[in-house]
Image (cartoon, coloured by chain):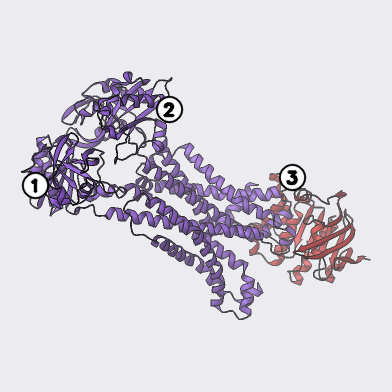
Chain colours: A purple, B red
Amino acid sequence: MHFKDLRIGLRQLAADPGYTAVVVFGLALAAATTLLLLAYLDTVLLSDRDVPGAQRVLRLESKTNTPGADKGWIDGGAMAFHDHWKESGARVEASSRYFTREMSLRVGQRMAFERISFVDAGLVDVFGLKPLAGDLRATLEKPDALALSARTAERLFGRTPALGKTITLAGRSFTVGAIVRDRGAGSALKTAVLVSILSPAMPEPFRLKEWASLRGTIFVRLQRSATFSGFNEQVNRYFEQTPFYREAFPSYGKIGEYRGTPLPDLPLAGAETDSTRRLVAGLSLSCLVISLLAAINFLNLSVVRTIGRQREIGIRKALGASPAHIALQFIGEAMLVALLACGTGFLLAWLAAPMVGDWVGLPIADSLWSPARCGLALAFGLALGALAGAYPAWVALRVDCAQSLAGRGHTETLAGQWLRRGLSLLQFGTAIAMIGFTVTVLWQTRHAQGAHPGYETAPLLIIDAPADMRDERLLALREAISHLPGVDAAGLAWDVPGRFNRNTTADLQGQKGETVLQAFSYVGPDFFQSYGVRPIAGRVFDAKDDPQDYDDRIVINASSSRQLGFATPAAAAGQFVRMGRHSVEIIGVIPDIRQRSLRDAASGVVYSVASARMVSVMSIRTRDPAATRLAIQQMWPRYFPDDVLRIEPVRTHLARLYDSDLRLGKLIGAGGIIALALAGFGLYALSAYTVRRRTAEIVLRKLHGARRRDIARLLARELGAALFAGAVLGLPVAAWLGEQYLAEFVDRAPIGFWALAISLLVTTLMALLAATRHTARAMAISPAHALRA
Amino acid sequence: MLKLSGVSKLHRTGDIETTALDTIDLEIESGEYLAVTGPSGCGKSTLLGILGLLDVPSAGQYLFDGTDVSGWSESRLAQMRRGRIGFIFQSFNLLDDLTVAENVALALEYGDVPARQRKPRAEEAMSKLGIAHRAGHRPSQLSGGQQQRVAIARALVSRPRVLLADEPTGNLDSAHGNEVMRILREINREGTTLVMVTHSPSHAAQASRTLRLLDGRILVDAIAA
């Protein structure tokens, strides 16, 4: 291959802008998707690659095995283990408890809301952390010092050196003792602000000693001689000797289990990584499909073009070009196109990175550019180009020199034609499958976001307060808010029903003496009023009759009433049942209100006004949300001067439950639209080729009296067959993918066959659009003109 | 220089087999000017294709410059063609994407001519054919006669010993046709072996030897007086 060949290739690309745009843009989309996928995988999988001996660093994860509880692993476990490694026999070299929460900070008069990580000094050894400035270990040993990441320091102090500066956290002063490097967004360790877990700012210090607590976790570095299985065995054996484990109901059997997950495995194999796995699969699928479709387009268009270049190939052969020369020329041209496409793809990736980053919930734009990643994407693009250019090169090699120079056309083999038709069908099928799946995901997500949670959401505002009910300020604030004009009720609870993310259960004794496990929810006395939930039997809590921490009365929901064996809700109201070791009165029954997402079935829930230390979420029912919000913003600093007000409509919280679904839908949707566009381009090329191949036949038919509509019918038959075969291929895949996705939901949108019908309709419209131009051209062919040519 | 012994060429389409050349024996000496005539479909172009190593015989032996090329691979045939054989076609077969100069220089790309010599060689060929002033034009911007001059320049630029012309005047008016014939005669006088397929009796009469084919066989092989 000569440089001049490439120059000629470039000139030919410029002379045929339509072809060039379709091919380059198609491959560019493949390159852009690949680069974005690599950036995403880099952020998710490799944020902790700098940790020395990462395989020996484990995060403690646990799962609850009690009946009715969520059986999945969670990224939390008893931090009490930290003080018992020696007794447990686990060969731990270093360890650090880890409790993280978003909290307010004050720097002078400025407020900020940051993720605070409460840790032990052992974290330095576990992660091999090296401070950029200051003494990190000493900082984490002090109760009144903290470390900031470089970006946090810049955010809080600008260009002024942060070391030695004072920050107020939870009403206490802390000195900045160290600056650490920012970790990747996908890191298991959040280092924006690091504070000693023994500092007075630790929000829930009681968790440090509790074996029942699963909030917070521990990172450990194993000794070189230790094994994972040995660690897991020792941890579980020790856990089973704890009073918490031994005192649990024997009928539950093994109530909990622990495991250590190595740091490199956390992103995909760790606990609570379902949404990440879904996103990785979604992005990989989109990338694969787009690359495949782009390659098919490239191949199809290149072959049509190669057939049109037979004379040139004949001349080159006559002038002494060997088969290797010809093959290299065509593959070289393909690589040139791929190179152009990669350049365009990098530009597209750069433009799309913030949007895609938003969809996947990670700032992937930060890790988009690196020589290795760009090199990998470039190599992928070139390999794709070379692969897709190989078949046209083969077609070029088969050109009969003497025949082509004599002007007698030679086309590809019948098998080749069928292969390309098959690939076009594959394009159609893929587009249909992806559009169908996208419709299913987005429809279900919309259904889930709009699903009624069992209470009126429209006038409800939620405040995530920085203090619990033991704090007089929170009670005073609630009182003040309840007297605001337009406010009907202001209640407290430990969470928002629907976003309920805590896993506490209670054991109740059913009517037949059996133990029935129920979800347990702590609420304030005004909770039900604020949510507008009325009892279907008995009564709900009331501030006058049911004071705070009055723990011998419960309210249950309708499911709980059934599960406890009561014939009707009315039969349950006023009854006494055993809860744990105490007797409690069921003062009323409420209808089921959704405690979790649509993926979970309604379950029995017990509501209690006990345990004020848990209750920190305020719900406000108001007739004028805007005015109420403004009034709260004005009064907030009087109660919590060191904290940022976090107030949002309850709908915002509920919508977040389906964030990952919406992201997946957007990703698959973007992939589907691109797939559809590429299939459209492919069809455009196929119809161009069909018309060119059948020109003589069309002319002859016209000579024998065929009308324009007869010609249209002739072409429509061929394209209709392609569409039909694509539908046969794609619709079952769309149905299967949709079913797999919907299987996770208990409450499903009434999609039926609509997703399939919509995908078929959209693809048909696209097919009509793509084939119109060449069909019209074929209908307009003048027999006289064609015969002259 | 070129020797065909018992050469046949069969074309097969499905079950139908047609004989394009039937046991041809032909020897062409160096410097000869051979005109090949005959009705359409008699095998003229097939013969030219085999002589030019573009096609391979189905049977028989072909000695090119004393070398038996029967059964050679496409790569070896391409190597043999390079710089040894020039082609001129009725439809010119110029590439519209290239300029005149690039079309001419294309013939040097696959040979052993060093890159720095290609441009002067192409300019020399264009000057010889009187088209140097059209070097930067595209073929579509030239008249038929000029296009054929470009094709001849491309055929000559590699200084081949054999020039094969397939109806070189077929697409030209008589004035341009005569001009092309004059150029070809000159090239032959300079020592290049010339084999020309033509339908024109007057052009055939200008050759030193005439071959008339019919149904793939040599009907007449006459040397001019």
Q: Amino acid at mark 3?
A: Asp
Do marks 2 and 1 both belong to one polypeptide chain? Answer: yes
Do marks 1 and 3 both belong to one polypeptide chain? Answer: no
Chain at numbered mark 2 = A
Which circle's residue, 2 or 1, is located before the other in the chain? 2
Q: Amino acid at mark 2?
A: Gln
Q: Secondary structure at mark 3?
A: loop
Return the residue found at the far top.
Answer: A86
Figure quadrant of residue A698 = bottom right
Which mark is nearer the camera, 3 or 2? Answer: 2
Give percent across and percent down for residue A114: 25, 36
How packed mark 1 is, by other alpha carbons closer than 10 Å (few <14, some 14-19, many 20 or more), is some
Give percent across and percent down for residue B2: 87, 54
- The residue singled out by tag 2 in the image is A55
> A93 or A44, which is in the foreground?
A93
Return the residue found at the far right.
Answer: B225
Q: Secondary structure at mark 1?
A: helix
In the shown orientation, is residue B133 left or right of residue A300?
right
Chain at numbered mark 1 = A
| Residue A392, placed above or below residue A193 | below
- The residue singled out by tag 1 in the image is A482
For the residues labelled 2 and 1, the Cα–Cα distance comes to 54 Å
Judge whether residue A677 can be spotted in this image.
no
- The residue singled out by tag 3 in the image is B112
How packed mark 2 is, by other alpha carbons closer than 10 Å (few <14, some 14-19, many 20 or more), is some
In the shown orientation, is residue A19 left or right of residue A3?
left
Q: Amino acid at mark 1?
A: Ser
In the shown orientation, is residue A345 left or right of residue A329?
left
For the residues labelled 3 and 2, the Cα–Cα distance comes to 59 Å
